[in-house]
Structures are given as structure tokens and as C-alpha cells.
Image (spheres, grey):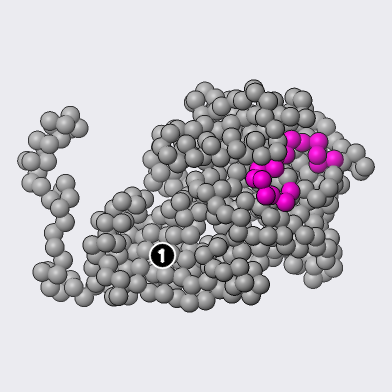
């Protein structure tokens, strides 16, 4: 059963022991960020850390702020309606299968998001308890876990995206649009027409909405229909007050407005998803907010960006893994590919590990080329690292991957460096400031063949037997399982 809204999801989290309510007073300036980061660090250390709802925020009596929504696979599973102990591979498979479907939204006349309507001079973005996440952030970022809704001026395509929005003043924000992203493509089409781009922003939703908004679907794909498929129920939409866009009827907060075709304003910096202050202030488009609608006692939401694992790194990892499996296995039918995984500690999309049966010479480079042809690979040269292991290695088990790397891969023979592949992402400090920002020079990529060479299969002496549990005789294995009470 789908969650009707964020509030139903919070009730589910609480019943599962996955919600921490903080009633002590916490300041929006850095203290919310510090609490969120501490919980993320605990999760990374193997300490189960819940999502957090702040209920006493300095200067905002009665306001509530919710974060760390998907910063564990347990809550990611719950967001998809699965048991919270669902294995990672099963979560990915659920995503993979649901992503193949679409469920059209249901248009309704009104909804809870219309309980309060604010227009004109009364619009004030500072009404909401938006955090300043990190000490060096250039803004309070009202948009970090949300859905930005915009319609392509040349077709019926409506895109839902997720990109940061730093508050400039009471009625405008910056928007971070990267070249190649769908938000950038649509904005450029409005610019070519010298027209303003209508936009709406939904904050505080069923977590599936921001989940699909941040997923790398192809151009022309409707994220709201994908949200319906993931929820397994249609998303209810209602018409915005000041433009023709349709917005989630059960969202906590809706911002409505426009982006002018050629207006830019300095935006940033921000503590980034890769775990660094790797960017700076850049001229970015401006979103002018003309109307705010919100529920009574709205719950504001956001996402901490920092060293992994965060909401973004887990979501990017899951989405990229599922969609690339569909691409390599179902669409391209590359022979031998068994499984793959984007490790979330590589900020979600920085490293792809593929397990494959060696059915042909040169297979690792074929696989890497196919990955880089997908939207995930085209976006700012991600993933820079492609590691191809053999079919007996589980790509989600980094210990097995390291073992394969150190015992089957000879660096001189099996490592391939590709220079200047695509664009450079400003937030990744692996390249110099000048290269990634001033010159926008493409970074390099690497393909590692962490398997025995294909030609060795002609002589069995080259490939030794593996000492795994299955190599013991069946009788001995049965005895082991019996005495360990695993049978």
C-alpha cells in the first residue's frame, strides 16, 4: 500500500523504530546539520541511526523539520513498501522491475497542499525553518529533498528534478542546473524562445517523489508516472494557483513561480554530495516565487550532503544500479553480464562494479563503453571507475571485490586509463580547481579488468581452483551446516 503523504510515512517510521523526535531546542543555523551528520556517521559505523524530526527550532515556534529520510537501506526499503530488513539486492530488484512500468497520475480538484495560499508581497521563504547545513554554506537551502516540476515547451513532457535551491531573499532562490541535466535542457529551450520558464517545487512528500526526482531516467520520461509505478498507486495531482503545472496534492509545501530566460545571480557555495566544499560561488538561474501554498502546520524536509552515506548516495546507488542493469542486461543484452552495483560510498555514481562471465575477449571495455553511453555515464563523466569482476564475485560485497582485484588483476595488463572523457564535475576535487571549474576540462576514467585473462581459459593450469565453501565435498558441507545449526 502506498503512503498517502509524508505524515503516513513518518507514522510508519515511528512504528518501525526508525524515527527520532527531538524536542530539545535546536538552532536552524548549523545545529540541525550537526545532528543530521552525527546520525549519518553512526549509520556508517554500523550503528543503526534513525531519521530525525526536529520539533523545537530556534525562532520558529511550532515548526517541524524532517531529514535523513533515506540515509539507510532500511528506510529506503520502507519507502518502497518493503520490509525494512529487505536485502540490498532485493531492494534494487524491486526498483528495477517497477522502473519498467508507468502509472498515470490522478487529477483532483483540491488537496491538503491548498490549506493555506500566500501570494504577492506576502510571499516569504523565511517563513519556513530552513537550515544552514554547514558553516561555510552561502545560503540557507530550502530545496535539498524535493521535486522541481517543469514542462518542456516543445512537447507534453513534464520533468520532475531535484537540484539545490539556496534562498537569495524572501521571494527568490538560486537553482543549480548542470549542463546535460533535464532541468538544464528544458531551461535552455525556454531561453532560446526568450520566454520565462514556469516552475513549481513540492516539499514534504511521500518519499518516492524525491526518490524518482533524483533518478537518472531518460529524456521524455515522466517521473510522476514512475512515482505511480513505484508507489503502485497513482499520484494525486492538483493544478497550481499561478500557472498550469500540476503539483502533488498531498505535499506539505508548494512553491510556484518562474525562471527568467537570461537572469543569473551568484549562488553557493554548498557542502557537496561528494563530501567536500569543492565548489564556490557561480552565476546560476534565479527562481522567482510568486505563490506559496502549504498545509496547516507544514513539515519542512531536507537532505544533508556530506561524506557518505547520505540520502543522495544511497538513492543514486540504487537507481543507477537498477537502471544500468536494465540497460546492459535487458536492452543491450551484453553477453555474460550477471550483476552490477554502484557502491554508495563512491558518492553513489562514482564507481560501477560489474560481475560477468568471460564469454569473449575485451568484454570489460565493451561493458564500460555501454555504461558510459547511458545517461548516468554521460553526466559529468560518471562513473569514472568501472571494475569488472568474474561471475563468482558479488559486486555488492566490497571485500570480495578487493580480493579479486589483488589476486586476479595484474595492473600492467588489466588497467586501462581513458583521458579527458566528457565533462568535469565542479564538486569533485580529484581534478584541479582550474581544470574542473575554469577550463571545464574532462577528467580521466579507468577500467579495471579484475578477472583472469580470457585467453587463459585455453590452459586450465592458469586458473586455479577457488577455495570457497562450495569447493568442500557435499558431505562435509552438510556436516558443517548441521553443527552450526544452519541447515
Q: Can residue 440 be seen from the camera position used here? A: no
Q: Can residue 487 be seen from the camera position used here? A: yes
What span is in magenta?
A: 124-139
Q: Position of residue 3 (x, y in %)?
A: 59, 33
Q: Position of residue 55 (x, y in %)?
A: 67, 26
- Can residue 137 be found in the magenta stretch? yes
At horizontal 71% and vertical 29% (from top left) the residue drawn is 57
Q: Position of residue 274 (x, y in %)?
A: 54, 55
Q: Position of residue 459 (x, y in %)?
A: 12, 73
Question: Would residue 6 be found to the left or right of residue 408 on screen?
Answer: right
At horizontal 52% and vertical 35% (from top left) the residue drawn is 39
Residue farthest toward the front in the current orientation of the protein = 135
Question: Would residue 378 be found to the left or right of residue 23 on screen?
Answer: left
Question: Is 131 situated above or below 163?
Answer: above
At horizontal 56% and vertical 48% (from top left) the residue drawn is 306
Which quadrant, please, contains the N terminus? top right
Question: Would residue 14 be found to the left or right of residue 173 on screen?
Answer: left
Question: Would residue 120 be found to the left or right of residue 75 on screen?
Answer: right
Q: Main secondary structure of the magenta part?
A: loop
- Can residue 294 be found in the magenta stretch? no
Question: Is 53 situated above or below 45?
Answer: above
Which quadrant, please, contains the C terminus? top left
- Residue identifier under label 1: 386
Taking depth in this image into account, of 179 and 9 the one nearest to the observer is 179
Taking depth in this image into account, of 453 and 29 the one nearest to the observer is 29
**Location of residue 10 (image quadrant):** top right
**Location of residue 248 (image quadrant):** top right
Question: Is 188 situated above or below 475?
Answer: below
Amino acid at each position: 500500500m502506498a503512503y498517502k503523504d509524508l505524515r503516513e510515512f513518518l507514522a510508519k517510521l515511528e512504528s518501525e523504530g526508525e524515527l527520532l523526535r527531538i524536542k530539545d531546542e535546536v538552532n536552524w543555523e548549523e545545529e540541525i546539520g550537526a545532528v543530521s551528520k552525527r546520525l549519518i556517521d553512526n549509520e556508517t559505523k554500523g550503528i543503526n541511526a534513525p531519521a530525525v524530526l526536529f520539533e523545537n527550532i530556534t525562532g520558529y515556534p511550532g515548526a517541524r523539520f524532517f531529514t535523513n529520510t533515506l540515509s539507510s537501506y532500511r528506510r529506503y526499503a520502507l519507502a518502497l513498501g518493503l520490509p525494512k530488513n529487505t536485502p540490498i539486492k532485493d531492494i534494487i530488484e524491486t526498483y528495477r522491475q517497477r522502473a519498467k512500468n508507468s502509472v498515470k497520475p490522478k487529477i483532483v480538484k483540491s488537496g491538503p497542499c491548498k490549506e493555506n495560499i500566500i501570494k504577492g508581497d506576502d510571499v516569504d521563504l523565511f517563513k519556513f525553518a530552513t537550515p544552514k547545513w554547514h558553516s561555510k554554506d552561502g545560503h540557507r537551502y530550502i530545496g535539498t529533498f524535493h521535486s522541481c516540476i517543469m514542462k518542456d515547451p516543445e512537447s507534453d513532457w513534464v520533468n520532475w528534478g531535484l537540484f539545490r535551491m539556496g534562498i537569495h531573499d524572501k521571494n527568490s532562490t538560486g537553482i543549480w542546473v548542470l549542463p546535460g541535466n533535464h532541468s538544464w535542457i528544458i531551461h535552455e529551450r525556454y531561453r532560446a524562445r526568450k520566454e520565462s520558464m514556469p516552475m513549481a517545487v513540492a516539499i514534504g512528500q511521500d518519499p518516492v517523489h524525491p526518490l524518482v526526482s533524483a533518478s537518472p531516467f531518460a529524456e521524455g520520461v515522466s517521473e510522476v508516472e514512475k512515482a505511480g509505478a513505484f508507489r503502485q498507486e497513482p499520484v494525486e495531482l492538483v493544478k497550481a494557483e499561478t500557472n498550469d503545472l500540476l503539483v502533488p496534492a498531498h505535499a506539505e509545501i508548494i512553491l510556484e513561480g518562474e525562471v527568467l530566460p537570461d537572469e543569473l545571480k551568484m549562488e553557493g557555495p554548498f557542502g557537496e554530495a561528494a563530501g567536500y566544499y569543492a565548489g564556490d560561488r557561480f552565476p546560476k538561474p534565479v527562481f522567482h516565487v510568486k505563490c506559496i501554498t502549504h498545509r496547516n502546520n507544514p513539515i519542512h524536509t531536507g537532505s544533508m550532503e556530506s561524506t557518505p552515506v547520505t540520502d543522495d548516495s544511497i538513492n543514486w546507488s540504487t537507481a543507477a544500479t537498477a537502471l544500468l542493469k536494465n540497460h546492459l542486461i535487458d536492452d543491450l543484452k551484453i553477453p555474460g553480464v550477471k550483476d552490477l552495483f554502484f557502491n554508495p560510498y563512491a558518492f553513489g555514481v562514482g564507481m560501477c562494479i560489474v560481475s560477468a562471465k568471460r564469454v569473449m575477449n575485451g568484454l570489460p571495455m565493451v561493458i564500460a563503453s555501454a555504461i558510459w553511453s547511458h545517461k548516468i555515464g554521460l553526466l559529468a563523466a560518471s562513473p569514472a571507475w568501472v571494475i569488472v569482476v568474474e561471475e563468482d564475485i558479488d559486486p555488492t560485497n566490497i571485500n570480495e571485490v578487493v580480493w579479486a582485484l589483488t589476486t586476479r588483476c595484474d595492473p600492467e595488463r588489466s588497467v586501462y586509463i581513458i583521458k579527458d572523457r566528457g565533462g568535469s564535475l565542479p564538486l569533485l576535487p580529484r581534478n584541479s580547481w582550474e581544470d574542473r571549474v575554469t577550463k571545464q576540462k574532462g577528467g580521466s576514467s579507468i577500467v579495471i579488468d579484475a578477472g583472469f585473462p580470457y585467453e587463459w581459459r585455453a590452459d586450465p593450469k592458469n586458473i586455479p581452483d577457488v577455495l570457497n565453501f562450495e569447493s568442500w565435498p557435499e558431505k562435509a558441507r552438510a556436516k558443517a551446516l548441521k553443527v552450526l545449526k544452519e541447515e
